[in-house]
Amino acid sequence: MDVNPPEVQRLVIEHIMKSDGVSPSSASFQLRVFSGKVPRPTGEVDYDTWRNSVELILQDPSLSDLHRSSRILDSLLPPASEIVKQLGAKALPVAYLEILDSAFDTVEDGDDLFAKFLNTLQNTGEKPSLYLQRLHTNLLKVVKRGGISADEAEQQLLKQFCRSCWDDTLIANLKLEHKRNRPPPFPELLLQLRSEENKHSAKESRMRQHLGTQRQRASSHIVTANPLDLSRNEMSEGTEVVELRQQVAKLQSQIAKQKNKQTGRSVSPSTNAVLELKQQVTELQSQMSKLRVQKSPEPKGSSSKMKQTNIQFSRGDPLKADHKLHHRPRPGYCFQCGEDGHVASICENDPNPSLVADKRKQLKERQALWDIQHGPSASEALNAGQSL
């Protein structure tokens, strides 16, 4: 006689399978750890995140209440586990959640949460898609607390997004203002925002790659071609101009002394000496003026009218032609890369210390030349020229 016939074995196996009732997918799902400590320890989640995970377990039909309670207890650490300890291990999941909600869930009512939702604005640098997700999370709390009905949720979500998202171009492209009465579901709206953000980001990247270098070159060209920036050509005059200026100053000083000695003497010899000195001064000034016209390069991009004005101005009184030297030379280059046309605060080039050092050396030489030209002797020469 067979003690375990096949029929009995089949019934035993079916009974075991029914009593187990745990699907492989449910067995692999584990709740995150929650303790309720403040501040929240590393590796733990907040109560809202943990509570949403529990809702997934409660909706799983393959789990019994005993398995659900076991999962909840396994995910709790003190002090949260101490709060539910009084209920025992065989209590229903609803009983655990009720006491945990009273201890860790938000205590604000639906109206307060809805007011906070209406004051949720997009932060600086926050993408519209991330802002929509943040709004959706807050709106779920409002619905849970009875602030609004679930049927109004999507309409209120789109209305608040259009009101407090600062990217008007994106809202116009997606025509979201026209969809307020019939708003799209949250997943569809989120996908539309992410797609539009991706298009905008790709277009900006292409624009930077194509126009970045050209824009920098154009800016440098405009500043370099400025006809008023004539102080950069002072070094081309060389030592000849310095020597001529010193000779003019000495001659004009001698003229002033001769005029002071005219009292008590015959007029003709003194007048002849003064005329001779004046003639020498005129010749030297003429040579210096011609030298400046020949050696000063014409600025690029300047019109013919500007060139004629510069030549006529330099052929006049040499003392007036040098009015640009009354201002001490200042730096006109970038302190990071050494190039002309921009400053270090907006420079996108790599640092070039050697070029910066060369530009600084040239600036010091121009300033030293200016100091020599506008020293005490130059001031005395100007005074003597005015008295003539």
Image: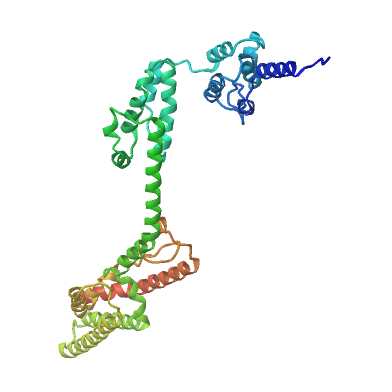
Q: Residue 54, position in %: x, y?
A: 56, 21
Q: Is residue 348 visible?
A: yes
Q: Is residue 79 visible?
A: no
Give the quadrant of residue 241. bottom left
The residue lying at 38 percent from left, 70 percent from top is 367
Q: Quadrant of the C terminus?
A: bottom left
Name the residue nearer the viewer: 353 or 218. 218
Q: Residue 143, position in %: x, y?
A: 41, 19
Q: Tag count in the figure? A: 0
The residue lying at 70 percent from left, 16 percent from top is 11
Name the residue nearer the viewer: 23 or 55. 23
Farthest residue, direction left: 267
In this rendering, would 7 be left or right of 273?
right
The residue lying at 32 percent from left, 29 percent from top is 183
Q: Residue 140, position in %: x, y?
A: 43, 23
Give the quadrant of residue 121. top left
Q: Quadrant of the N terminus?
A: top right
